[in-house]
Each structure stands twice: as structure tokens, then as C-alpha cells.
Image (tube, rainbow, N blue to C red):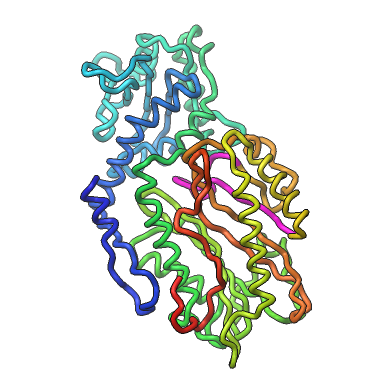
Amino acid sequence: MTKLLHLLFALSTTWAFAQAQPQPTILSERERARVVDEILEDRFTNLLPQLMRREGIDMWVIISREYNEDPVLKTMLPSTWLSARRRTIMVFFDTGKEPSADAPEPVEKLAIARYDVGNLLKGAWDIDVRPNQWDALADIIQKRNPKKIGLNISKNYGHADGLSHTEYDEFMAKLPADFQKRIVPAERLAVGWLETRTAKELAIYPLICRLSHQIVQEGLSEQVIQPGVTTTDDVVWWFRQRITELGLDTWFHPTVDVQRADDKKFDHLRTFAKRPSGEVIMPGDLLHVDFGITYLRLNTDQQQHAYVLRPGETEVPMAIQKAFQQGNRLQDILTERFQAGKSGNQLLKEALEQAQKEGIKGTIYSHPIGVHGHAAGPTIGLWDQQKGVPGPGDYPLFANTAYSIELNAAVEIPEWKKTVRIMLEEDGLFDGQHFRYIDGRQTEIYTIPRKLGYVK
């Protein structure tokens, strides 16, 4: 891993905006595969036993068919497996033993398949002995005699609800009645696996977030935007093309919108449900972008602002700067309240109450992020549910989990005779004691063109 981290930290400039930070090196497909597999092995070896014991499940069975993969199983496939094969069944069994020279790993990892799943799951189906795959699975279960058998069944999280009805019926038809009584939902185990970031992942996440930030800064610059000519759609598709050129991926289509001194109301509901497209970007516009990338199986989700300077202007108007400060303050109000064990709904309630005391008209809709963009874990409000979110909002905060701090502050701009919304989103980590942004956050609105000498 040392060699790969060295490669990740190697820097090279790739675009003409010379005052920006150099862009992290993007690994080749082969190097990416090596990183992914090393991280996956570490997660299986060090994280999985902790989670299974925390949730009291000594056997976890994950079943998927090709092209209908369980979201959890997708995160467990080696780099060279892009999907399940035929029916892929994974079994994780906690032996209850502590690591030793004879048994270095307390969790046995098996694939009820005709071959190994990469180097990490041993194939445990001898078709000559048991021609039926379900019989082979039932035999494995009976021989190990688990107390609880976790299946990915969940009301609250699609991420943890990956067992299809057909697979469940066929499995139960072959499982002896005594073991059927031991079936339990593996929701919290699945969410724990998806939401927890390991030390190896945290070593690379800052570079992924930095890369995403730099693409945003490039897109919100004179390198891309010519006022009076460039449209918001032009910038959106520039982002998509840039992602492709860099050999990256994204988990959602970017959005770019404007607020300006006109008689149009910036409708909060319209902002989320149906954004206007194709507007020509003009001097005096306050631009907003919502953007994210996928790299090394981790995701980013960021929202930032830029202001297009009018002729003669050298900085963002003071009223808009002060509005932006309210957005930053709302971020602080929320993240200062992060505490292990608190639910997303508790955080939402406390933050909104404090914002109201400080005269900030805030809306909070923050979410976990990691191997999914809108990831599993505690939901901290939805833009249309500010009283709490039953189910996902009741889930507690655990250590080493990542979040997109997504929210907006509505602020009256006297010169514009209207309200603007400062819509911010930045990725951060809660380590169990403190919250920190993975690659910092935007604290000043970018200008187009950039102010001379400006460095983020």
C-alpha cells in the first residue's frame, strides 16, 4: 500500500489555471484495481469481525444473481468482478475465536460457488457432492450451527434490502425449520459495513475530495465561462465531459443554476424538483453548482458558489458576502452538534433550533456519503422533511463515518430586493469525537474572473 499511497500523493498540473493547487495524480486502471483490492482485504480482515460482534450476528448470508446485485454485495466484489456471476452467495461466519497463528482471521469467508471470489472468499460448493446450490448452502449452515443468521432485509434502507423475494423463497424452502427461526434482519450490520470508513480509505479520501473540488473550481472560472455567451447547460456538460476526460465517473448529473437581481423568485421547491436550464450566464449572477465524482469506489458531493463580476467590480458585493457567511455559520451550527449515539433527527432538531435563535432561516438536508452518494446511515433532514425523517433519521452516529453537510440559508439581499439561498454542500468525517471537512470547505465565493493573486 505504501507504493500506491506514494503514487496517490504525486502531483501534476493539468490545466491552465496556474494559481490553483496541483491536481492529484489519477491512477491507471491497474493501479486502481490494486488499491481497491487492498482496501477490500483490509475491510474483510479488520472491520467485518468488529461489526458482526457489535450487532450480535455470527453468520451473514448475502445472495445475489447477475444483474440484480445486492448493493452490499457490490461493495464486496473484487476489482475484476464487475457483477455477480450466475447466483453468487457469500457466507461470513464468526467462529467466536480470537486471531491466532493457527486461525489468524476470526471470520470465515466462503462463497457458495464453483470457484473462489477473487482471493478473499473461498469457493465452498462441490457440485459433484451436492449438485444443488441451495443444498450446499444449507449444509454449510448446519455444519457451523450459527445462533443468528443475518439476511439483507430492511424497511428503512434500500442499501440493506438487497435480498430479492425469489431468492428468499428458494433459500427458505431448503433451510431446515430449526434454522429458519434463527433468521434476523441484517440491516444494522449492512449499514455499518457500508458507512464505516477504514484508515486506508481515509488516507485516500482527501485526495478524492480535492480532485472533485479542483474540477468545480475549474468549471466555475473564466477557463470555462464567458459571460454573455456561456449557458448553465454548457457548464453542466463541461463537467460531464471533464469527468470522462479524466477517466473518472459520477453518481449523478451535475446541476448549475443562477440567482440574479431580477423580478424572478428563486423558488425553493423548484430548485430541487425542476431547475431551469440553458440560462445565459451574465455579469452580476450568483452561480451555484452541485457536483460529485466517483473514484476508487468512493464518492463526493459538493455544492459551491461563484459570482460573475460586473464591469468595474473587483469583489463580491458585501451583502452577498454576508449572506455566504450565514451559510458557513449554519454548517458550523450543525457540525458542532455531532456526537456519537445521537440520531440524525436529534441533530436536525438541535441545529434548526439554534439557527432560529441566531436569526438564520436555514434548511438542512445532510446525508451520509461513501461507497454510495446518498449513502446508508443517519439521515439529517430532507429538504421537504424538516421535522425529522422516521426510520433513517432515527439511526445513530457512529465513529469513522462520512457525511455530506448539505443545507441552505435564505438571506434577504436589499440591493436585489429579494431573497437568495446560499446552498452549500461539503464532505466531512466524524471520528467519534470531532467532525472535520475531508478537504476543507468553501469560505469565500469565487469570482469570475478570479481576483488577481487569489489562491484557495
**Highlighted magenta segment, given as a residue range:** 361-378
Q: Position of residue 343 (x, y in %)?
A: 63, 37
Task: For the C terminus, give its image quadrant.
Answer: bottom left
Name of the residue lying farthest toward the top: 178
Q: Position of residue 176 (x, y in %)?
A: 46, 9
Judge from the rendering whether residue 235 lies leftward or rightward of residue 11; answer left or right: right
Task: For the N terminus, give its image quadrant.
Answer: top left
Q: Is residue 287 above or below residue 401?
A: below
Q: Position of residue 211 (x, y in %)?
A: 39, 62
Q: Is residue 217 above or below residue 185?
A: below
- Which one is nearer the viewer's eye here, 253 or 299? 299
- Which one is nearer the viewer's eye here, 61 or 436? 436
- Which one is nearer the viewer's eye here, 370 or 83? 370
Judge from the rendering whether residue 328 lies leftward or rightward of residue 218; answer left or right: right
Residue drawn at point x = 57 percent, y = 88 percent: 228
Q: Position of residue 36 (x, y in %)?
A: 31, 45
Q: Quadrant of residue 136?
A: top left
Residue drawn at point x = 28 percent, y = 68 percent: 12
Determine if residue 253 is in view: no
Q: Quadrant of residue 146?
A: top left
Based on the picture, tell me whether residue 359 belongs to the magenta stretch. no
> Overall secondary structure of the magenta stretch?
loop
Residue drawn at point x = 43 percent, y = 24 percent: 61
Based on the picture, tell me whether residue 371 belongs to the magenta stretch. yes
Count up the numbered dots.
0
Determine if residue 62 is in view: yes
Q: Is residue 265 above or below residue 29?
A: below
